[in-house]
Image: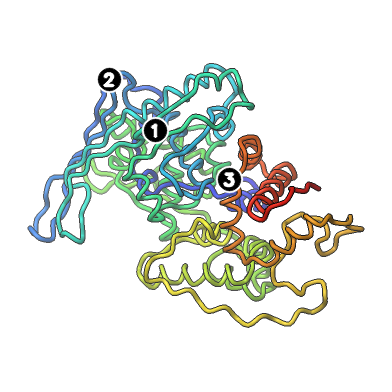
Amino acid sequence: MRGAAESEANAAAGWYDELNLAEFGLASAGERRLDGKKTVIFEDTVWDKEARKRLPRKLAISGSDLYGLPTAKDDDVLLACVQLSAAGGFADRDVQFSRYELLKLLRWEDSTRNYRRLSKSLRRWAGLTVYSSRAFYDHRRKSWVNRDFGVIDNLIVYEREASEGAAAPQSSRFTWNQVFFDSFQAGYLKRLDWDLYCRLQSPVAKRLYRFLDKRFYRGGKVEADLRTLSERTVRLSASNHTGQHKRQLLVGIAELEREWELKPTAPAERFRREARGKWTVVFERKRRSSSKSVATDNALTGAAADLAAAGVSATMAARLAKVADERTVRTMLALFEHYRQTGKRRDAGFLVNCVRDPAGVRFPPNFVEPKAAAPRTPPDDRSKSRIRPLRDSPGGPGAKAPPAKSVAQRAFSAFWDGLDGLERAAFEREAAAACGPLLRDGLERTRTGGGAAFEAYRKLVLREHYQRIRGGPADAD
């Protein structure tokens, strides 16, 4: 397992998984379907409260004749597409990208073969359709809904990207199906350790990680029916017998025991026989040492302490309290509590992302924003404003011999210092949408890695937009 610093870095990056996709695998765990099937069907029964009896339920996944059903690598690509949407705050069904960007996100080699593999995978998802009978329930109409939908509605991929590589503009694009996009908009998401996901070698380990990471939110122990877990969640072959299911699951389980927080358990305890042909799989999460976190939590004060009390790690809470103004933190804490009180709980990752990207938050209609607290008396002249300057900008507290700022720089700094956290996020989003193609490409290419290069592009985009709306020439450092 990696250290705590790496886990915090992943938590701050904003990686996400869609909860339906974490629970139910649309792609098989293998790299190819040896049986040549283009459709798989899952059948079970569901309890109907109105009819007071169990009714048959069916879910079918059907691929195109040309590209077939998705496989393990296609699952990686689809999850990477979710990360592209996450980078844009899940604000638009249409997502622009380049295949080079996707390759780097997936940590695949920059090769012609992989460019072709990405195109095939995206086409495979564009050709997939899900047919359901009694798989969805409309609580308002009190009726089962037979909902049929795809994953990707429209897809445009430019072939020149393979030769242009890193210089390729974000010209390719795809459009999420409305069903998936509505799920994103509703916040049916969970945080994801993308570094861990890419590091895992076994497709079974990847599927189990996504499933268990979702289920462990409710407690440290998860029990699942062996056949349901193997065939519907992990998507192993339905023709496997019990022994084959166990052996294939154990490969992924062993990797999660090494790389993640899954508690090592002997196979005799991992698989529990309930009846003839019926087995239960038992998973437990490792207990974390709390002495260090308790000591750190006790040192937190104000907004950071409140974030930690809501479930955010002490390190992340302290970091958020430094980069976000108190009004934003208090608003997002109130939103987090609102969801808890209305029975729609969100995890701590949701809270972290809201504080980091307040412009991407959609507030429910009945949410009441808390009133702003009275400003505190600053301890000295250096902190008269409750708004912090741009991160890493010259002239900040503790900077050594800051260079003199131009008139344009001072004007922008004064404008920026006058915005609160929500206004800053909205302005930054407008700036990114309005900037020219060169700046936009540089901003997006450096966003994942962050660091000085990303901050340099970010400042240029912000200042250019400020000059655009206020008039006058832009001024660089």
Disc 2 residue type (three-letter): Asp
Disc 3 target residue? 434
Q: In x, y percent, where is residue 421?
A: 61, 64
Q: Earlier in the sequence, mark 3 or mark 1?
A: 1
Callout in the foreground (1, 2): 2
Q: Earlier in the sequence, mark 1 or mark 2?
A: 2
Q: Secondary structure at mark 1?
A: helix
> In this rendering, would 349 be left or right of 154?
right
Disc 1 target residue? 247
Q: CA distance from mark 3 to mark 2?
A: 41 Å
Q: Residue 65 bears which disc, if any?
A: 2
Q: Secondary structure at mark 2?
A: loop
> In this rendering, would 142 be left or right of 10?
left
Looking at the rendered structure, the number of numbered marks drawn on it comes to 3
Q: Quadrant of residue 43?
A: top left
Callout in the foreground (3, 1): 3
Disc 1 residue type (three-letter): Arg
Residue contact at pointers 3 and 1, CB within 8 angstroms: no
Dot 2: few (<14), some (14–19), or many (≥20) neighbours within 10 Å? few
Callout in the foreground (3, 2): 3
Q: CA distance from mark 3 to mark 1?
A: 54 Å
